[in-house]
Image (cartoon, grey):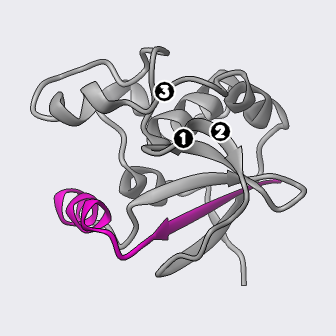
Amino acid sequence: MITLQFSTTKGIGNRVIRWATWSPFSHVDLVLDDGRLLGATARFGVSVRDPEPVKASVRFQVAAPAEVVEAARSQIGRPYDWPGIFGWGFRRNWQEQDSWFCSELIAWAFQQAGHPLLRFDKVWRVTPRDILLSPLLEAID
């Protein structure tokens, strides 16, 4: 099982993301077996980091192979997708591997493992809300 953590903090950037995507959450990470988080952040790019305090969070499990985590790990060190921020109004290919948003990285890793969360081939961007809508997510009590 793969665990995903959706979260939000109090920052203005997080409020803008939630507003623009109609989502209660502004961020999504993979939760590793040791409790650390693997994902893309504006501050660190794609990295593994210790959990930090958040305003709200929820976790879901997905029955998926370990290759999801391996795919995401292969992107460690890539930068945050700053050009994508400005490209939201345009149809930038979210699957370009030069930089990542948190949700792009998660969607791409699941696709690489042969276990897509949604039909992402039909969308031009992927947000935390899009992933949150996947029918494959199982809530963790």
Identify residue for label 2: 47
Callout 3 amino acid: Pro
Q: Who is closer to the viewer here, 30 or 47?
A: 47
Left or right of 43? Residue 23 is left
Describe the element under mark 1 as helix, strand or loop: loop
Q: Is residue 123 visible?
A: no
Residue situated in front as seen by the camera: 73 or 134:
73
Image spot of residue 26 (x, y percent): 38, 61
Q: Which residue is mark 1?
A: 44
Residue on which the image places disc 3: 79
Query: At 76% across and 36% down in the image, what residue appears?
Result: 69
Mark 2 burial class by Cα count in 10 Å: few <14, some 14-19, many 20+? some
Residue 20, horizontal then vertical, whole percent: 17, 57
**Residue type, label 2:** Ser
Q: Nearer the viewer, residue 123 or 72?
A: 72
Would you say the residues marked 1 and 2 are in contact, meaning their CB atoms lie under 8 Å apart?
yes
Q: Residue at x 42, y 44 (%)?
A: 42
Query: How far across and down, in percent of the image, does residue 104 sit?
Result: 45, 35
- The region drawn magenta spans 1-22
Residue 1 visible, this angle: yes
* First of labels 1, 3 by sequence position: 1
Residue at 60 percent across and 44 percent down: it is 39
Determine the secondary structure under disc 3: loop
The residue lying furthest to the front in this view is 43
User: Residue 11 has which mark?
Assistant: none
The residue shown at (54%, 41%) is 44
Residue 43: say if magenta: no
Would residue 135 appear left or right of 8 to someone viewing this image? right
How would you rate the neighbour count of disc 1 (Cα within 10 Å): few for under 14, some for 14-19, many for 20 or more? some
